[in-house]
Image (cartoon, rainbow, N blue to C red):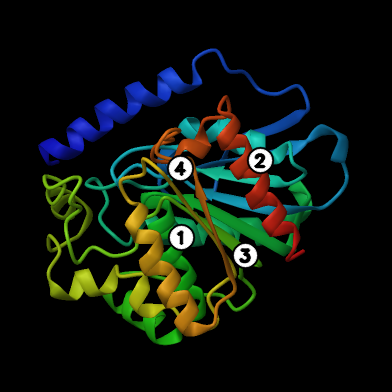
Amino acid sequence: MSKFSELTRQSFSESDKKRDEGLTTPAGIVRYDDLSYGDYGNWNLLDVYRPKDKEGVKLPVIVSVHGGSWVYGDKEVYKYYCMSLAERGFAVVNFTYRLAPEYKFPASVEDTDNVLRWIYENADTYGLDTENVFAVGDSAGAHILGVYSNFLTNKDYAKKLMEYGLIKEPQDKISFRAIALNCGKYSMDEVDEANPDAKPILDDFLRNGGDEKEIDLVNVLKYITDGFPPSYIMTCYGDFLKKEAGKLISELEEEGVPFEYHFYGSKTEPLGHVFHCNVRLDAGQRCNDDECDFFRKYL
């Protein structure tokens, strides 16, 4: 593991613990915790959160793909954010996936696919409406969600990904009504100006350290087609990845994919990267309301 990734895990963990200190499960939420969806033990666990007052009702689903620079994070870090989404009337699936460098790309995408397969197989048990499946992803999670959405909607790309190492073919029955891509990174053909030392992550994340073929393969922008899910694109003042949103929007416009773009905060009221995960923040709650309203348009 690179020193950069070690420091990322340490600093992100400290920040997230401080953000969520003192939070508890909302009174109106029922939790189903630590459900296994794959073969990799604690790496392959998920939670399902539902509103208590919707018992016996099949609910539209939001799948959360957490961020963390591909090397950090799990479902525990995202549980309060995900439960706040469930309070808005959704069944929310919050999962842990295999991280780099212990597991190289496309392990995180493969785990995302296995979570979706689990949802369709266990829909009756947990009241999941598979006709209305949505997803949110932020930062590295937005990248993973973008890659996975291309896998589901671009047959040529799916073939390339399977040749590289993804084991299973996409299932026709699996699809997203719409997705939300928050403060995301969508290509890796240049190192972030804000993080010039971040290049070692490529060595941790990619099998060959980011050779030409790999950089092409993880480029979400290149493989978007008109079948890509309708998308809510979000960034904010203070997000070091805010320029990425414009690149994504250009490709969505080119392919005619429906989308909404939202920019939060201002120079006088900066918010920062993935601010929406902070359930104590008014702007975060407003953003999450906006995203859920966007999803409801596609029910």
Closer to us: 277 or 243: 243
Number of residues whose C-alpha sits closer than 10 Å to that of mark 3, classed few (under 14), some (14–19) or many (20 or more):
many
Q: Earlier in the sequence, mark 2 or mark 4?
A: 2
The CA span between labels 3 and 2 is 15 Å
User: Taking 210 as reference, is 281 above or below it?
Assistant: above
Tag 2: residue type?
Leu
User: Taking 10 as reference, is 134 above or below it?
Assistant: below
Q: Position of residue 57 (x, y in %)?
A: 87, 48
Residue at numbered disc 4? 96
Q: Is residue 31 visible?
A: yes
Q: Is residue 122 visible?
A: no
Tag 3: residue type?
Ala
- The circle on residue 145 is 1
Task: Give the quarter of the image for residue 16.
Answer: top left
Q: Earlier in the sequence, mark 1 or mark 2?
A: 2
User: Taking 22 as reference, is 244 above or below it?
Assistant: below
Q: Residue at x 41, y 68 (%)?
A: 248
Number of residues whose C-alpha sits closer than 10 Å to that of mark 4, classed few (under 14), some (14–19) or many (20 or more):
many
Residue at numbered disc 3? 178
Q: Residue at x 53, y 75 (%)?
A: 228
Eye-nearest disc, 1 or 3: 3
Residue at numbered disc 2? 85
Q: Secondary structure at mark 4?
A: loop
Closer to us: 244 or 227: 244
Tag 4: residue type?
Thr
The CA span between labels 2 and 4 is 17 Å
